[in-house]
Image (cartoon, helix red, strand yellow):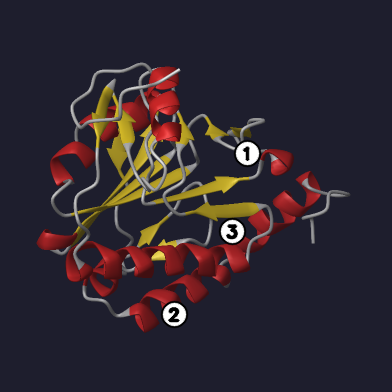
Amino acid sequence: MTFRPLEAGDQLSRPEFERRFETMHGLKKAELIEGEVYMPSPVRWNQHAGPHADFIGWLVHYRAHTPGIRVGDNGSIRLDMENEPQPDAAMIIEPAFGGQVTLDADDYVVGGPELTGEIAASSVSIDLHKKFRAYRRNQVREYVVWRVLDRAIDWFVQREGEFERLPLSPAGQYQSEVFPGLWLDPSAMALGDLAKVLQVVDQGFAAPAHAAFVAHLRNRGAGRPNSS
């Protein structure tokens, strides 16, 4: 059976979107957001590729010190029948350690990850509107949007079905409520000062809350292959 290729603006269900996507060999990214197909534009270095790498590095640094955590880069997420985004970054608690997503037989994440992140330059309107609504509705617990051109980072946390802004600490840092010890200096990140970004995460690792979270995860994952 022959399927039409995906085109930006197509209105599709998630199964139809996946069928067409799978026939387009070599296509690296396409998203279904609220039933509409979005296709990637060329990626600029300073507006996306560089910030994206720094953002992933920050999350991977956290993962290296926290058991039962996985970080994904541009992985497709099956949210619901009208949404299959590929967030620039996602971090989950693995299902075996008590996380809220599942991994289906096709190796897709199903459900809202504990944290998603988007690097927003030309995509800022969709990231803060359609994606915002889709992530909120599907119980993504924390959503981080780096507005590169504005040199600003927004961090939202799910509370009673709504996204609320996570307040900054007195030191001007974001401190995750879902991932204790995941701290971020938004000014340092926006300016590309990765050394300071990682220094702040190291401070988060020294906080008692991170040690308690690690102990909790190890207890949940006791006896499983990734529990150490």
* Label 2, label 1: how far apart the Cα atoms are: 27 Å
Residue on which disc 1 sits: 99
Q: Nearer the viewer, mark 2 or mark 3?
A: 2
Which residue appears farthest toward the bottom when viewing the image? 195
Residue on which disc 2 sits: 199
Examine the image and state in which quarter residue 8 appears. top left
Q: Secondary structure at mark 1?
A: loop
Q: Is residue 195 above or below residue 223?
A: below
Q: Are marks 2 and 1 in contact (CB under 8 Å)?
A: no
Q: Is residue 4 above or below residue 97?
A: above
Q: Which of disc 3 and disc 2 is earlier in sequence?
A: 2
Q: Which of disc 1 and disc 2 is earlier in sequence?
A: 1
- Give residue 54's position: percent from left, percent from top: 36, 70
* Label 3, label 1: how far apart the Cα atoms are: 18 Å
* Label 2, label 3: how far apart the Cα atoms are: 17 Å
Residue pictured at 40% horizontal, 45% vertical:
116
Residue pictured at 88% horizontal, 49% vertical:
223
* Mark 3: amino acid: Ala
Q: Secondary structure at mark 3?
A: helix
Residue on which disc 3 sits: 209
| Residue closest to the eye, 49 or 197 | 49
Q: Is residue 162 visible?
A: no
| Residue closest to the eye, 112 or 47 | 47
Q: Nearer the viewer, mark 3 or mark 1?
A: 1
- Give residue 159's position: percent from left, percent from top: 39, 31
Q: Is residue 23 left or right of residue 119?
A: right
Q: Are marks 3 and 1 in contact (CB under 8 Å)?
A: no
